[in-house]
Amino acid sequence: MSPMRWMTEATCGNARAGHLHTAHGIVPTPTFMPVGTAGTVKAMTMDAVRSTGAGIVLGNTYHLMLRPGAERVRKMGGLHRMMDWSGPILTDSGGFQVMSLGALRKLDQDGVTFNSHIDGSKHRLTPEISTDIQHALDATITMCFDECPALPATPERIEQSMQLSMRWAARSREAFVPRLGYGQFGIVQGGTERELRERSVRALTDIGFEGYAIGGLAVGEGQELMFSTLDYTTPLLPGTHARYLMGVGTPDDLLGAVERGVDMFDCVMPTRAGRTARAYTERGTLNMRNARHAEDNRPISPHCDCLACTRHSRAYLHHLFRNNEILGPMLLTWHNLAYYQRLMRTIRAAIVASNLPAVAAGLRADWAAGDW
Ligand SMILES: CNc1nc2cc3c(=O)[nH]c(N)nc3c(CC[C@H]3O[C@@H](OC)[C@H](OC)[C@@H]3OC)c2[nH]1
Ligand SMILES: [Zn+2]
């Protein structure tokens, strides 16, 4: 087993197709990583997750340290064992959740003290504590402990926050226990300020990581500002390492970010939409609660091999959601994740065949065409 590394297979413009080699298997990129925040991809068995073709799933330090606790996960054999997932797991470092979930929190130069949103108990996260927790979880990919400032924010606030995150990145790297096939990703910060992004990339590449994430985006800045930030940030990152855009996004976001050189993604949209009756398809999204589906015997998508599309109809999904049946969110989450994985395979094949521009135009035309 060699150290974790990303290998290029093909490029098409700024887009890349490659493979991420890890201790828990090789993952084709571009890849979409289902969110498994508290050690479960909500409403999905891991057999269902595997059937969609997912390569990497996510866990989260913040949620798992509160419940069941990192020490208990370690005693139970680690997250892979508990989740029944032998593939790679990427865990976020918890900083983002503390800022967005933690009821009360106090940020200082050394770390964050916060009260659990579950029972109000007091906790602390620092670069060292977060890195140790991710090690106890046996995460294949560990994320640096960072601070993601809420936008809009003044350039001064973003500069202060980025500098703090870079100091925390160095401490996270110091605390990381290198193991063959395991890796740690640095997280680029700097908001939508070009000069700050450039300084953040330099700080992280001086430290050296197995991969690099672009953080601080998908926090309300909008797609145009996100894409323009990617336009000048991804080319600064080493071409030989995987690039991960955190918290993104819609199918249109994914396509545009792959075109700008991003390899890895995570987003709650397909799973959250699955629980709220929103279906993703090649022709845009559908609200399965809408009465127009009540007697529609067609599958959600004619191109989908998921259980909802091969065994059931739109009318049945409509019925399940109207009756608040548990099977509704199960089937629709499965379908949405299957759609996201199929979309990534389509995009990857286009890069390998060097015809991403034509395929991208076709995808965008279909999304705009509206339902069949
Ligand atoms: C939605 N927009 C969005 N922008 C983000 C930016 C950052 C960032 O700069 N630093 C860190 N550390 N995390 C970020 C995150 C959280 C991703 C996690 O959030 C969890 O999804 C709920 C999931 O945890 C399993 C995922 O794990 C990687 C972001 N999410
Ligand atoms: Zn389907």
Image (spheres, rainbow, N blue to C red):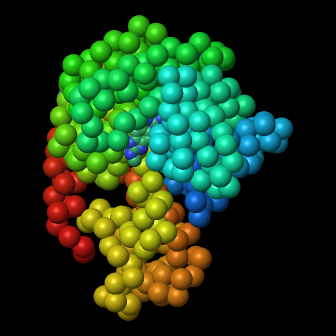
Query: Number of callouts in the render?
Result: 0
Residue furthest to the right: 75
Which residue of the protein is positioned furthest toward the top in this rendering? 206
Q: Where's residue 184, x and y in %?
A: 54, 23
Nearest the viewer among 136 and 372 is 136
* Residue 97 % position (x, y): 51, 44
- Nearest the viewer among 23 and 116 is 116
Residue 55 visible? The answer is: no
Q: Quadrant where the C terminus lies?
A: bottom left
Q: Kindly identify the residue that appears in the image at 42 percent across and 65 percent down.
A: 273
Residue toward you, 26 or 130: 130
Q: Is residue 31 left or right of residue 347?
A: right
Q: Is residue 104 visible?
A: yes
Q: In which quarter of the view is residue 47 placed? A: bottom right
The location of residue 212, given as percent across then percent down, is: 42, 24
Task: Examine the image and state in which quarter residue 270 appears.
Answer: bottom left
Is 183 on the left-hand or right-hand side of 341? Answer: right
Relative height, residue 342 to residue 198 (above, below): below
Which quarter of the figure is the N terminus placed in?
A: top right
Name the residue: 73% across, 38% down: 70
Most distant residue in the bottom direction: 295
Q: Relative to residue 3, is residue 144 depicted above or below?
A: below
Q: Position of residue 312 (x, y in %)?
A: 49, 79
Position of residue 156 in the picture relative to residue 88 (left or right): left
**Going 33% across and 65% down the picture, which residue do you hit?**
281
Residue for point 36% across, 64% down: 280
Horizontal side of 6 relative to 228 (left or right) equals: right
- Measured along the vertical axis of the image, is residue 359 above or below residue 213? below
